[in-house]
Each structure stands twice: as structure tokens, then as C-alpha cells.
Amino acid sequence: MSDLINEAVRLSLAEDAEDLLAFDERSGEPDLSFETVVKKLKRSGKI
């Protein structure tokens, strides 16, 4: 049982590390409001 829990915790922490790396990689991107994103998607025909 302990091995299963350890593996689950390890996988969860690995996912967190991936998320933090993605945040760092995208830190230079401009912030966009939700409304701006929706407008762009509508204009491009994606929604």
C-alpha cells in the first residue's frame, strides 16, 4: 500500500513541476482578457 501511495504522490509532484515549467516558459507572453480571447476565436471562426 505504501508503494502505491508513494507512486501517486511522485506522479502528482511531477505534474506540478511540469506546470511550473510551463508557467516559466510562458511568463513573457502578454496577458489577455477573457473577452479578447473570445473575440479573437470568433473572428477566426474557431467558435
Image: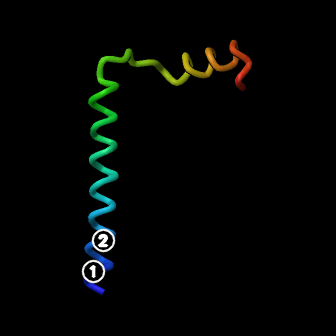
Q: Is residue 47 left or right of residue 15?
A: right
Callout 1 amino acid = Asp
Residue 7 numbered mark, or none: 2
Q: Would you call the spot at circle 1 few (<14 residues within 10 Å), some (14-19), or many (20 or more)?
A: few
- Name the residue rendered at 48%, 20% in the picture: 33
Disc 2 element: helix
Spot occupied by residue 19 in the image (x, y as percentages of width and height): 33, 42
Q: Residue 20's image quarter?
A: top left
Mark 1 touching mark 2, by CB under 8 A? yes
**Vertical relation: 37 (above or below) 5:** above
Decide which of 33, 9 is in the foreground and name it: 9
- Name the residue rendered at 30%, 77% in the picture: 5
Callout 2 amino acid = Glu
Spot occupied by residue 46 in the image (x, y as percentages of width and height): 70, 23
Tag 1 residue: 3
Cα gap from disc 1 to disc 2, whole angstroms: 6 Å
